[in-house]
Amino acid sequence: MGLTLIEKILLNHSEQNEVGPGDIIDIKIDVRVARDFGGANVVKNLVHHGLDIDDPAKTYFTFDCNPTGSDQNYAANQQYCRLYARENNINIYDVNSGIGTHLVVEKGLVVPGSTLVSTDSHANILGAIGAFGQGMGDQDVAAAFADGQCWFKVPKSVKLTLQGKRPEGLSAKHIVLNLLNCFGANQLLGYSVEVYGEDVAKFTLDERITIASMATELGAIIILFPPSDDVVDIVEKYSGAEVEKIMADADACYEQSFELDLSTFVPMMSRPGRPSDTINIGRLEGIKIDSAFIGSCTNGRYEDLIEAARILESRKVAPGVVLKIVPATDEIWLRALDDGLIKIFKDSGALVSNAGCAGCASGQVGQNGPNEVTVSTGNRNFTGKQGAGLVYLGSPADVAASAVAGYITTENNIPESPQVFTSTAFFDRPAVKVAVAVKSAPTLIEGKVWLVEQDNIDTDMIFHNRYLTITDLNEMGAYTFDNLKGWEDFSQQVTPDDIIIVGENFGAGSSRQQAVDCFKSLGVQAILARSFGSIYERNAINAAFPILQYDDISTLEIKQRDQIRVNFATGTICNLRNGKTGQIDKFSRVQMEIYQRNGLLG
């Protein structure tokens, strides 16, 4: 039986004779990347465990989260990484370079069929060129730096065919927002998705990047595009080498196949709180905005800037609205300068910053204040992700049009006179720091339950990005769930040895390790969920923090603060209040091995 695209890439980087969904294999990593906030913890792991660098020529730091140097903690982490890089001959794409996942393509470091790991949860953007990119936690990336490989579970594959013709004016961002409308945040959880179709084959590299960059928001491991001739030509120009196309076998076996009619897709935006809460943009027409942002790894490409410039030329940003524009890489920035786009942006009244991630990272332009309404081309709009305000996600053209109008609209409905308004509400809630000793747990545990009956709890709800610079585990617990509505005081209520039970897709979103370690800081013994976000699952396993999946435990009739017993080795669970027992997923071999040696790097 033939191989899917992901299976072929992973097989080519393993010592296996064959691979299949669910197999746990070691794969060689062609490119290993750590960003500025994650990089410091990667280095700490390497130094603490006395590990050397496997191949400095394949190892990189990318300082894209805070390239403005506006945050002292980020600056300290960057300098810490610089010092380590100098001692170990590691390459750095510093604060003047741009987004790492774009740079590895632009600099010719990856080609179709390559493998890459990064502390960036959107490393799966490389699916745009038919390469394997995966965001991983600090311990994973440290292991890749040291060993040149990592373990990985071969995902199941989905074949997605977009039939029909793309409607005129429908952007790549509209397409991926339509996909979120169809599949939500977890229907594709853990899958590798291959995209096909007559019009799909015509998608430009920039369009493929936009769609692939939101695989994480769809819950997918990666969205893979078979490379077209045009994409191969571009990659060959970047890499200076002849590139061989990599394609799925004709008889590849897919877990599921979907066919969607591209001609029925409509312009959409995501409403604040969830990227998957998408709606026809016409139903949002007229909502006042305070600010607008064009950039991110999703829409900071040159074609995106062209779309924005087309609308902003000879127009002005509405009074009272702030428009921030951030190109993805310095090469794109310079091209926009040479071609006159920067002048158009500045003449319109926009702020143009140096290349980087911008709004998705807490330290650079793109953040908003309390009650501020923002339209953004970013990939995430989780509560608090881009600041304390409300964020709608849209295409570059829609964001530019809205910035000119002063409210959400499209380029066909820009008014002659903008709507003017201001909003200056602001508040600041002080954080309470609590230090709790970490307690290790055996393979058989007992504890009281916290039932957090919600799905899609993302890492910003668990451990918000404003605390990302905290590296002391004893300090992390105080901030657990403080961005999850109704659970803001969780850290003050929890007691050591407690067990948490949640719904589907727990830990969706970012690759931050703190979203795992904060529970260890509080002494929580384990988390049980119907499913976990892919990166979160890895982080927890690698940190030797017990997580287990269940299908149905309703027969146990568990109530809030019941005492339960869980056996990691057998998957047996018992409600000690009523004596009812059930079965959940036990630890896998890899999870048990890592747990018993107290962590991946233990």
Image (cartoon, rainbow, N blue to C red):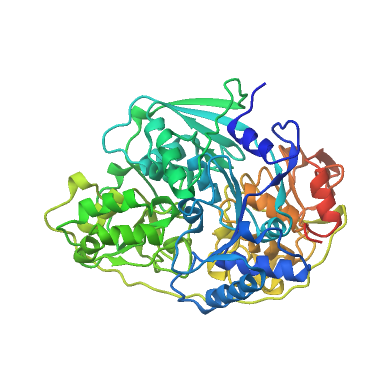
Q: Nearer the viewer, residue 436 or 151?
A: 151
Q: Residue at x 75, y 39 (%)?
A: 15
Q: Residue at x 60, y 20 (%)?
A: 251
Coordinates of residue 517 in the picture (x, y in percent): 70, 63
- Which quadrant of the figure contains the C terminus? bottom right
Which quarter of the figure has residue 114? top right
Which quarter of the figure has residue 343? bottom left
Coordinates of residue 17 in the picture (x, y in percent): 75, 31
**Residue 406 visible in rendering:** no
Coordinates of residue 59 in the picture (x, y in percent): 62, 59
In-image side of 12 versus 288 (left or right): right
- Which quadrant of the figure contains the N terminus? top right
Is 127 situated above or below 144? above
Q: Residue at x 55, y 30 (%)?
A: 247
Coordinates of residue 2 in the picture (x, y in percent): 64, 23
Is 397 situated above or below 197? below
